[in-house]
C-alpha cells in the first residue's frame, strides 16, 4: 500500500441546502433533520480507502448565509476539492451555484480552473415532490461549467452521499498526482541537502498541515 | 470571592438587595460596579438572572424608551424579504432539543423566537437577520421568558453594546475582534501563537463561532449564561478576556495537538467548557 494521503475538501452552498446533514451522514452514517445552522465553519475528518489507497479527508463545512461569504474565503485556500451544494426544492439555491463557484475560484487560487475537482450536489432527493430544479437543468449547468460531475443525494435517507464524496476524493487524488508528475520542483537545496519538491503527498494535500492522530503522543507517522 | 455554601448564600442575599434597591450598576464616570462583577464571576443563582439582566439594561440604556412595547412590531409584511426567508429557515433549527423551541413549518411563525427576530429585523434593515442572532435571541427568551423583554435585551446588545456591527454584511467588527485576539495571544503567549500559525489555524475558523453566538454555540447552558451575565455588564472586552485566557490556560493541551482539524475542534467545541469546569470563571477572568 502506498503512503497515506491528505485531502482538504470544502463544502459550499446556500444556507439550509443540507451541507451539514450531508457531512453528518457521510462521516457518522446517520443524520437528523434540522441540524443547527453552521456559524463560521465546522470541521470533520474521515479516513477512507480510495483505489486501494488510504486517504485522510479533512472536510470544511462552511456557513451558507451570504453575509458570511467573505469570512469563508479564508477557508478556501489550499482546498483539494470543492462541493457546490444546492437544494433541488429551492431554485434560488441552484442559481447561486455560480456565485459560490466564482467566490471559490477567486479566493482559493485553484490553479487550472478547468481541471479543478468540483462536484455539484443536488440535495434533498427525499423531497422529490417539491422539486424545483430538474436533473436535466442541473446537468446542463454542470456541462456548461467544465463537465463537473453531478450527484443527486438525500442526506437524510443516505442516497448517493458516499458516491459524491468518493468522486471528490478520486478526482482530487488524480489531479494531485498529475500536478506532482508535471510540476517543476519549487527549490532544490544546496549543501544541507534539503530538497523541497512541490509534491502533492508531501504538502499534506495543501492547506492542511497533515499529521494524523489527535495528539502528538498518539500521532501516526505518514 | 465567596467559598462554599455560606459564601453562596451571602452572595445571593447581596444580589437580592441590589436588585430590590435598584442599586447603581454604573457610576457617573462609566465604571461598572465591581460588586456586581464579583457576584457574576462567583456565579449567580438562575432564578435571579432575569431580574439582574433587566436591571443592567434598564440602568445602562434607554432602550425601553426607544423601543416601547407599543412598537413591538411583529408584522412580517414590514420585514425585509431575505431576512424573513432566513428567519423562517433558522427558527426550526434553533435549540430543537429544547421542548420550548420545538416547532415546524406549520407553527414557526407563531413562536416567540420568530416574533423577536422579525421585530428586530424591522428596526434594523441594514442587518435584517444574520445567523447567530437566532441563538442569542433564543437564549434571552429562555432566561427572560417574556418575548418583549427578551427583544429589549436583544436591542440593548445590538445597539448599546454595538454588537450589531458583528452581524453587518462581511462582519466588520468580527474581523476587528479576531485581530485583537491574535494580538493579545501574540503578546501573552508567543509560543502558542506560533504553534497555531505553524499548524495554519485561522482565527476565522477558531473564534468566529464564539463571537457570533456570544459563546452560545458550543457551551452548555450554565456556562453560556455565565458568559452572558458578564457580557451584558461589560460588553466585548469580557469575551476577549475569556477567550484569550482560556487559550493561555490550555496552552499545554493546545501545544500537544499537531493536527489542524483537531486544533479547530478543540478550540471551538471543548476548550471553553473544559476551562470553566476545570478553573471556574474567577480563574479564567484572572488569567494564568
Image: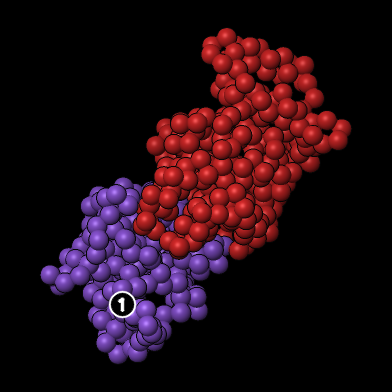
The residue shown at (46%, 31%) is B278
The x and y percentages for residue B50 are 62, 26
- Residue at image coords 24%, 57%: A220
Is residue A46 rendered to the left or right of residue B243?
left
Q: Colour of chain B?
A: red
Q: Is residue A161 in view from this perspective?
A: no
Left or right: residue A109 versus residue A122 is right
Give the residue at mark 1. A200
B244 or B111: which is nearer to us? B244
Q: Is residue A218 left or right of residue B243?
A: left
Total tally of numbered discs in the picture:
1
Q: Which residue is situated farthest in the front direction here?
A: A191
Label 1, secondary structure: give it: loop
Along the line of sight, which residue is nearer the eye, A180 or B46? A180
Asked whether the viewer can see residue B143, the reply is yes
Report x, y in % for residue A49: 17, 65
**In the displayed image of the protein, which residue is found farthest to the top?**
B6
Q: Give the color scheme: rainbow, by chain, secondary structure or one colour.
A: by chain
What x and y, as percent, mark residue A91? Answer: 42, 69
Parent chain of label 1:
A
Of the 4 image quadrants, the one containing the C terminus of chain B is top right
> What is the quadrant of the N terminus of chain B in the image?
top right
Q: Is residue B7 above or below residue A101?
A: above
- Output the letter for the chain in purple: A
Q: Position of residue B179 (x, y in %)?
A: 62, 58
Using residue B217 as the reference point, say whether residue B257 is left or right of it. Answer: left
Residue B198 image-quadrant placement: bottom left
Rendered position, A69 above or below B22: below
Amino acid at each position: 500500500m502506498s503512503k497515506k494521503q491528505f485531502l482538504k475538501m470544502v463544502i459550499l452552498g446556500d444556507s439550509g441546502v443540507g451541507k451539514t446533514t450531508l457531512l453528518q451522514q457521510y462521516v457518522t452514517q446517520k443524520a437528523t433533520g434540522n441540524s443547527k445552522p453552521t456559524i463560521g465553519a465546522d470541521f470533520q475528518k474521515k479516513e477512507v480507502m480510495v483505489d486501494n489507497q488510504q486517504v485522510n479527508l479533512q472536510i470544511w463545512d462552511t456557513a451558507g448565509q451570504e453575509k458570511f461569504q467573505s469570512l469563508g474565503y479564508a477557508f478556501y485556500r489550499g482546498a483539494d476539492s470543492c462541493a457546490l451544494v444546492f437544494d433541488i426544492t429551492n431554485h434560488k439555491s441552484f442559481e447561486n451555484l455560480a456565485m459560490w463557484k466564482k467566490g471559490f475560484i477567486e479566493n482559493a487560487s485553484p490553479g487550472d480552473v478547468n481541471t479543478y475537482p468540483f462536484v455539484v450536489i443536488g440535495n434533498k432527493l427525499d423531497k422529490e415532490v417539491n422539486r424545483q430544479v430538474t436533473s436535466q437543468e442541473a446537468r446542463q449547468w454542470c456541462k456548461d461549467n467544465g463537465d463537473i460531475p453531478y450527484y443527486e443525494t438525500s442526506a437524510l435517507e443516505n442516497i448517493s452521499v458516499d458516491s459524491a464524496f468518493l468522486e471528490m476524493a478520486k478526482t482530487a487524488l488524480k489531479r494531485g498526482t498529475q500536478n506532482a508528475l508535471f510540476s517543476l520542483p519549487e527549490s532544490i537545496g544546496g549543501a544541507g541537502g534539503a530538497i523541497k519538491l512541490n509534491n502533492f503527498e508531501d504538502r499534506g494535500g495543501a492547506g492542511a498541515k497533515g499529521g494524523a492522530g489527535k495528539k502528538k503522543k498518539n500521532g501516526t507517522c505518514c | 470571592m465567596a467559598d462554599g455554601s455560606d459564601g453562596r448564600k451571602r452572595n445571593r442575599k447581596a444580589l437580592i438587595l441590589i436588585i430590590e434597591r435598584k442599586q447603581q450598576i454604573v457610576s457617573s464616570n462609566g465604571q461598572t460596579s465591581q460588586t456586581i462583577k464579583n457576584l457574576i464571576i462567583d456565579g449567580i443563582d438562575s432564578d435571579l438572572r432575569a431580574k439582574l439582566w433587566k436591571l443592567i439594561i434598564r440602568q445602562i440604556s434607554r432602550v425601553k424608551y426607544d423601543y416601547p412595547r407599543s412598537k413591538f412590531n411583529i408584522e412580517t409584511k414590514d420585514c425585509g424579504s431575505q431576512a424573513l426567508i432566513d428567519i423562517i429557515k433558522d427558527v426550526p433549527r434553533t435549540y430543537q432539543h429544547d421542548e420550548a423551541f420545538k416547532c415546524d413549518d406549520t407553527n414557526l411563525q407563531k413562536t416567540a423566537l420568530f416574533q423577536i427576530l422579525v421585530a428586530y429585523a424591522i428596526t434594523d434593515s441594514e442587518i435584517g437577520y444574520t445567523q447567530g442572532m437566532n441563538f442569542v435571541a433564543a437564549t434571552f427568551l429562555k432566561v427572560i421568558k417574556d418575548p418583549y423583554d427578551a427583544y429589549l435585551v436583544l436591542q440593548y446588545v445590538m445597539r448599546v453594546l454595538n454588537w450589531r456591527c458583528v452581524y453587518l454584511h462581511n462582519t466588520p467588527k468580527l474581523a476587528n475582534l479576531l485581530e485583537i485576539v491574535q494580538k493579545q495571544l501574540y503578546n501573552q503567549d508567543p509560543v502558542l501563537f506560533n504553534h497555531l500559525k505553524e499548524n495554519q489555524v485561522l482565527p476565522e475558523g477558531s473564534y468566529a463561532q464564539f463571537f457570533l453566538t456570544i459563546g452560545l454555540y458550543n457551551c452548555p447552558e450554565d456556562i453560556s449564561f455565565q458568559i452572558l451575565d458578564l457580557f451584558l455588564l461589560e460588553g466585548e472586552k469580557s469575551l476577549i478576556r475569556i477567550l484569550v485566557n482560556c487559550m493561555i490556560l490550555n496552552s499545554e493541551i493546545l501545544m500537544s495537538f499537531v493536527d489542524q482539524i483537531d486544533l479547530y475542534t478543540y478550540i471551538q467545541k471543548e476548550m471553553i467548557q473544559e476551562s470553566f469546569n476545570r478553573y471556574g470563571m474567577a480563574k479564567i477572568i484572572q488569567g494564568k
